[in-house]
Image (spheres, rainbow, N blue to C red):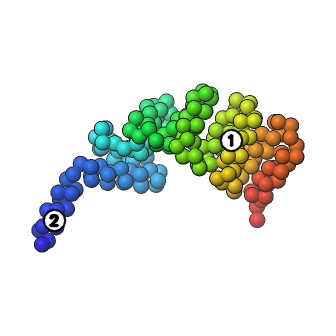
Amino acid sequence: MKRLIIVFLLFILSQPSFAEGLLSKQATAFYSDNNRQKTMDLILQINEKDRTAQDWLLLGNVIEDNGEPDNAVFMYNKAIEKDKKFYKAYYNLGNYYTTKGQFDLAIKNYKKAAKIKYDNPYIYYNLGCTYIKMGDYKKARSSFNKALMYKKDLPEIHYNLAYTYQQMGNKKMFYRYMYNYNEMTKQE
């Protein structure tokens, strides 16, 4: 019986999809521990055609963390090729394009991410920040309000809403959200 179990385990472990699934899980764990080199090493062991969208995203994240954001874009696009509904890749592309000042591309990617994962407050928050950079305070306000629908206790949303209302000349709402921000960040 032991011999049968050993043979079965060896068979399972020798299957590419099983082994690659383990590598993906290990890579994710190493990335969570901020071990970028080990993350990269594990994912590179997976055949390109067998990499998941998450694998491509992690490669992009590692490359971006290593100071090469322009090269990370390729990986995020590979993640999208693998899974058109992988909102995290669109989100990361939105972040990338915002930092490059390519706001139209940023907005396009954030909106795609929001269409897939409509209840993620960080998508709307970053979309709002992008609208602020463009000087479109009405759209920024709308995005921050959507973010608040899903996460009311994030001080940054309140701060940016206060700033947005200040830019729009609405002192009452500025004070309201600044008060919220100050209450949330008060030192005990």
Q: Secondary structure at mark 2?
A: helix
Residue beneath disc 2: 6
Residue beneath disc 1: 143
The image quadrant that residue 128 belongs to is top right
Question: Could you tell me which residue is drawn at 46 percent across and 41 percent down?
Answer: 85
Q: Is residue 12 shown above or below 105? A: below
What amino acid type is highlighted by mark number 2?
A: Ile
**Residues under labels 1 and 2: Cα distance?**
56 Å
Marks 1 & 2, CB-CB < 8 Å contact: no
What amino acid type is highlighted by mark number 1?
A: Ser
Of residues 163 and 86, the one drawn nearer to the viewer in this rendering: 86
Of residues 145 and 20, the one drawn nearer to the viewer in this rendering: 145
Q: Secondary structure at mark 1?
A: helix
Of residues 85 and 36, the one drawn nearer to the viewer in this rendering: 85
Left-right relation of 12 to 30: left
The image quadrant that residue 13 belongs to is bottom left
User: How far across and down, in percent of the image, does residue 97 sit?
Assistant: 57, 31
Dividing the image into 4 quarters, which one contains the N terminus? Answer: bottom left
Q: Residues within 10 Å of mark 2 (few under 14, many from 20)?
A: few
Q: Taking the image as drawn, is residue 5 in sight?
A: yes
Q: Taking the image as drawn, is residue 75 in sight?
A: no
Q: Earlier in the sequence, mark 1 or mark 2?
A: 2
Question: Could you tell me which residue is drawn at 71 percent across and 36 percent down?
Answer: 139
Q: Residue furthest bottom?
A: 1
Dividing the image into 4 quarters, which one contains the C terminus? Answer: bottom right
Q: Nearer the viewer, mark 1 or mark 2?
A: 1
Left-right relation of 102 to 78: right
User: How far across and down, in percent of the image, does residue 53 sit?
Assistant: 40, 42
User: How far across and down, in percent of the image, does residue 141 sit?
Assistant: 74, 40
